[in-house]
C-alpha cells in the first residue's frame, strides 16, 4: 500500500488530463443559466429549437453532455415538455423516469475516509449537467426510434413538498417508473392513477433512495471489503484483535 | 293432458330460472395467483390475474421479490467494486451488463479502451447474447409443452459458457471489464475453439427451428397471441427483440451512439411485422444466428495490441455525468452515471430492459386465456434480476 503513491506519480498527468476540460465547464455553466446556446452541439440545435418553439421560457438550461442533449425545464412545464418531445420530436419511446437527490451523503458512523476502497464523496452540494436548484431533481429520457433523437429532460422539484406532474397520460410506461420514483424518493406525481409501492412491501416507511436514508449494512460495517473477525464463544477480546491486525 | 303439459312447462321454467341463477353465481370473477414460483417467471415474478372463466380480465404483476437496491448500494462502492454488483442484474448475460457502466465511466474520464479490448468486449457481449437466447429457445418450447428443446438448450449453452469461462474465469459472473480495457487477453487456442463452437451454435439453431417450427402445436399456440402494436410498445418502453418483433427497425448496436466495435461490423437487424409471441421467438432465433456471424466476423479481424489503456492505479472519475445505453440481449440497458470526482459514483440510475418489457403486461394480458398467458410471459423473455435490480 505504501508504495502506491510512487507508482501513481508517473501517471499523474493522465489522471489530471480528463479533469481539466470538464472542471471549468461545470463551474462556468452552473451559475450562469442565461447563456445555454454555446453549450449545445450543432446536431442538437434543431431538437432544442423544436422544444423551444413550444416551451419558450420554460426551458431553464440546455447543454450537450457527452453527446446527449440535456434540457432542464421549469417544474410547471414538465408535463408539456413530455407532450412536446413526443409530438414535435417524435420521441415516442420512454426510456426511464427517475430522480436525483443532490444532497451530499452523510457518512455512516465508523466510516473511515482513509480506508483504501471506501469511496469518499464531496461534502458540498453541486449539480450535474444543465445545472440544478434545490435538493431533488426529476429526470427522464425519451427517444425516437426512427432516428437518433434522444433527449434527457430534467426538472427541479420543491424539497419540502416534492411533486411534479405525472406523465402517465403521455407515456403509459411512466406508470411503473413513477411508482418506483415515488417510493424511492418520495416524489408525488400529480395525476398518477394509483401511486403505491412497487418494489417494497406496502407497509414500508421512508424513502430508501434519498441520501439521508441510511444503508443499514454500511452502518454496521463501514465498507464491504473490511475483514470481519467474530469472537469465538468463550474467548477473550485479545486473540481477536491479533487476528484482525 | 293440457293440464299436465302446463305443469310440466311450469316445472321446467322454474328449474331453468334456477339454473340461470346458478350459472350467474358461478360466473363471478376469480382471482388467481401465478407465481412467485412458476417456471415461466424465470425467478420470482408474481402475476395476480382476475379471471372470467378462462379469460384474463385484469392482470397486475407484483415485482420486488428480488429487489436488491443496487442503485443505493453502488453509492457506497468504488468504481471497480460496482461491476461485481451489476453482473447480477441480468445474470444470463452478465458480461453485457458490465459494458455500458464501464463505458459511462470511461466517457466521463475521457479515456478509451484500446481497439483489441473493444473487439474482445464485442465478441464476449455477442457470446452472452447467444447464451441468453439459447436458453430462451429451449424455454419457449417448454412453456408450450414441448420439453425436449430445454435439454438441448442447456446442453448447447454449455459450449458457449465454457468459452466465456475460458476467457474470463467465470461462467456466469465474469467481472472481466476494467475501466480502460479488460483484465486479460484471450487464452491461446480460444479463437479456434470459438470458431468451432459457432458452428455448433448454427447447428443448434437449426435443431430448435426444426423442433419448434416443425411442430404445428407451436404455431397454433403462439401465432396471433399476445400482440403488441409498435406504438403501444414504444410508449411502455418495450425494447430489444420484443420491439423488433413488432416491426420497429431499431437496434442500438446500429442506431445508437457508437459503442464497442459495432460500427465496424456489418450485420442485419431482424424484424418481424407480427408483434405476437411467434414473432418474438422468430426474431430471437435469427438474432442468435446473426450473433454467431458477428463473432466469426470479428474473430477474423481481431486487431493486435494491448487490452488495457493507461489508467491510474486508483480510479478517480472526475465530476460529470454520462448516459450510456446499449443493446443488451434483453433490450435497451443503460446506466446514467453521475460522478462528483470521487472513487465511487454519486448516483447511478440503472435502466434495465426487463423492467419496461414487463410493465406492458397489464395491457397485453387483458383478454387472453390462461395458457396463453404463460406463452406470452415466455416470449417476452425477462430475467427477474433485470426487473428488480
Image (cartoon, coloured by chain):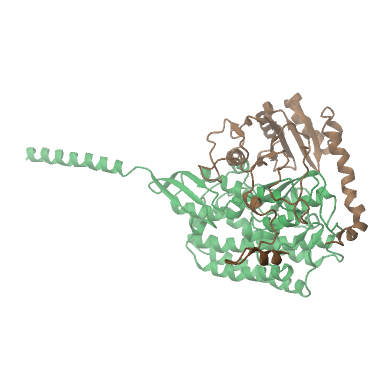
Furthest-bottom residue in this view: B189
* Residue at horizontal 53 percent and vertical 33 percent from the top: A193
For the colour green, the matching chain is B
Answer with left or right where residue B34 lies relative to residue A243: left
Residue B27 in which image quadrant: top left
Which shade of the palette goes to chain A? brown
Please tell me whether residue A59 is drawn above or below residue A16 in the rendered image: above
Q: Is residue B213 visible?
A: no
Camera-side residue: A204 or B115? A204
Answer with left or right where residue B365 lies relative to residue B334: left
Residue B180 picture location, percent across and down: 82, 57
* Residue at horizontal 67 percent and vertical 71 percent from the top: B162
* Residue at horizontal 57 percent and vertical 70 percent from the top: B152
Furthest-top residue in this view: A57
The N terminus of chain A appears in which quarter of the rendering?
bottom right
Residue B194 picture location, percent across and down: 72, 71
Camera-side residue: B354 or B74? B74
Residue A22 in which image quadrant: top right
Please tell me whether residue A156 is drawn above or below residue A123 in the rendered image: above
The C terminus of chain A appears in which quarter of the rendering?
bottom right
Q: Is residue B47 visible?
A: yes
Residue B14 picture location, percent across and down: 18, 39
Residue A151 picture location, percent across and down: 73, 38
Number of numbered discs overlaid on the protein picture? 0
Camera-side residue: B207 or A243? A243
Amino acid at each position: 500500500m505504501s508504495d502506491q503513491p510512487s507508482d501513481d506519480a508517473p501517471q499523474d498527468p493522465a489522471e489530471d488530463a480528463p479533469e481539466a476540460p470538464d472542471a471549468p465547464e461545470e463551474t462556468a455553466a452552473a451559475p450562469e443559466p442565461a447563456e445555454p446556446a454555446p453549450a449545445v452541439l450543432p446536431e442538437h440545435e434543431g431538437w432544442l429549437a423544436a422544444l423551444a418553439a413550444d416551451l419558450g421560457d420554460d426551458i431553464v438550461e440546455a447543454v450537450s453532455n457527452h453527446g446527449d442533449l440535456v434540457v432542464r425545464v421549469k417544474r410547471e412545464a414538465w408535463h408539456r415538455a413530455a407532450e412536446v418531445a413526443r409530438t414535435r420530436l417524435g420521441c415516442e419511446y420512454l426510456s426511464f423516469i427517475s430522480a436525483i437527490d443532490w444532497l451530499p451523503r452523510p457518512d455512516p458512523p465508523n466510516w473511515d475516509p482513509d480506508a483504501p476502497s471506501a469511496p469518499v464523496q464531496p461534502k458540498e452540494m453541486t449539480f450535474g449537467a444543465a445545472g440544478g436548484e434545490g435538493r431533488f431533481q426529476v429526470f427522464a429520457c425519451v427517444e425516437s426510434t426512427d432516428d437518433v433523437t434522444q433527449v434527457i429532460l430534467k426538472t427541479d422539484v420543491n424539497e419540502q413538498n416534492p411533486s411534479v406532474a405525472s406523465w402517465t397520460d403521455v407515456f403509459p410506461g411512466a406508470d411503473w417508473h413513477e411508482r418506483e420514483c415515488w417510493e424511492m424518493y418520495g416524489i408525488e406525481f400529480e395525476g398518477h392513477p394509483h401511486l403505491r409501492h412497487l418494489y417494497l412491501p406496502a407497509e414500508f416507511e421512508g424513502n430508501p433512495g434519498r441520501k439521508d436514508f441510511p444503508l443499514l449494512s454500511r452502518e454496521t460495517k463501514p465498507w464491504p471489503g473490511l475483514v470481519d473477525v467474530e469472537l469465538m464463544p468463550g474467548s477473550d477480546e485479545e486473540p481477536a484483535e491479533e487476528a484482525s491486525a | 293432458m293440457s293440464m299436465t303439459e302446463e305443469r310440466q312447462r311450469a316445472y321446467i321454467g322454474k328449474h331453468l330460472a334456477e339454473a340461470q341463477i346458478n350459472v350467474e353465481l358461478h360466473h363471478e370473477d376469480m382471482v388467481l395467483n401465478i407465481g412467485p414460483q412458476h417456471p415461466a417467471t424465470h425467478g420470482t415474478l408474481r402475476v395476480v390475474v382476475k379471471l372470467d372463466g378462462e379469460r384474463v380480465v385484469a392482470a397486475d404483476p407484483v415485482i420486488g421479490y428480488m429487489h436488491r437496491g443496487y442503485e443505493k448500494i453502488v453509492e457506497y462502492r468504488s468504481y471497480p467494486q460496482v461491476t461485481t454488483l451489476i453482473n447480477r442484474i441480468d445474470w444470463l448475460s452478465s458480461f453485457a451488463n458490465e459494458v455500458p457502466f464501464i463505458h459511462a465511466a470511461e466517457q466521463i474520464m475521457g479515456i478509451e479502451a484500446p481497439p483489441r479490448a473493444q473487439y474482445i468486449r464485442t465478441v464476449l457481449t455477442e457470446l452472452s447474447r447467444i447464451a441468453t437466447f439459447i436458453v430462451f429457445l429451449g424455454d419457449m418450447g417448454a412453456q408450450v409443452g414441448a420439453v425436449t428443446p430445454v435439454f438441448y438448450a442447456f446442453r448447447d449453452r454449455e459450449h458457449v459458457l465454457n468459452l466465456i469461462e475460458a476467457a474470463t474465469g467465470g461462467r456466469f459472473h465474469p467481472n472481466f471489464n476494467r475501466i480502460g480495457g479488460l483484465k486479460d487477453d484471450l487464452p491461446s487456442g480460444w479463437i479456434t475453439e470459438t470458431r468451432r463452437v459457432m458452428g455448433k451454435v448454427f447447428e443448434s439453431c437449426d435443431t430448435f427451428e426444426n423442433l419448434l417450427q416443425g411442430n404445428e402445436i407451436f404455431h397454433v399456440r403462439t401465432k396471433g397471441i399476445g400482440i403488441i402494436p409498435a406504438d403501444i410498445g414504444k410508449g411502455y418502453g418495450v425494447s430489444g427483440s420484443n420491439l423488433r418483433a413488432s416491426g420497429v427497425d431499431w437496434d442500438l448496436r446500429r442506431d445508437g451512439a457508437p459503442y464497442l466495435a459495432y460500427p465496424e461490423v456489418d450485420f442485419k437487424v431482424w424484424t418481424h411485422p407480427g408483434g405476437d409471441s411467434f414473432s418474438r421467438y422468430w426474431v430471437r432465433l435469427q438474432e442468435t444466428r446473426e450473433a454467431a456471424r458477428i463473432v466469426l466476423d470479428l474473430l477474423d479481424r481481431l486487431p493486435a495490441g494491448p487490452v488495457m489503456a493507461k489508467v491510474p492505479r486508483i480510479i478517480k472519475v472526475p465530476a460529470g455525468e454520462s448516459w450510456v445505453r446499449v443493446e443488451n440481449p434483453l433490450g435497451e440497458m443503460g446506466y446514467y452515471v453521475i460522478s462528483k470526482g470521487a472513487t465511487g459514483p454519486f448516483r447511478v440510475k440503472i435502466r434495465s430492459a426487463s423492467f419496461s418489457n414487463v410493465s406492458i403486461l397489464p395491457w397485453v394480458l387483458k383478454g387472453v386465456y390462461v395458457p396463453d398467458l404463460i406463452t406470452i410471459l415466455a416470449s417476452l423473455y425477462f430475467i427477474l434480476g433485470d426487473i428488480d435490480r
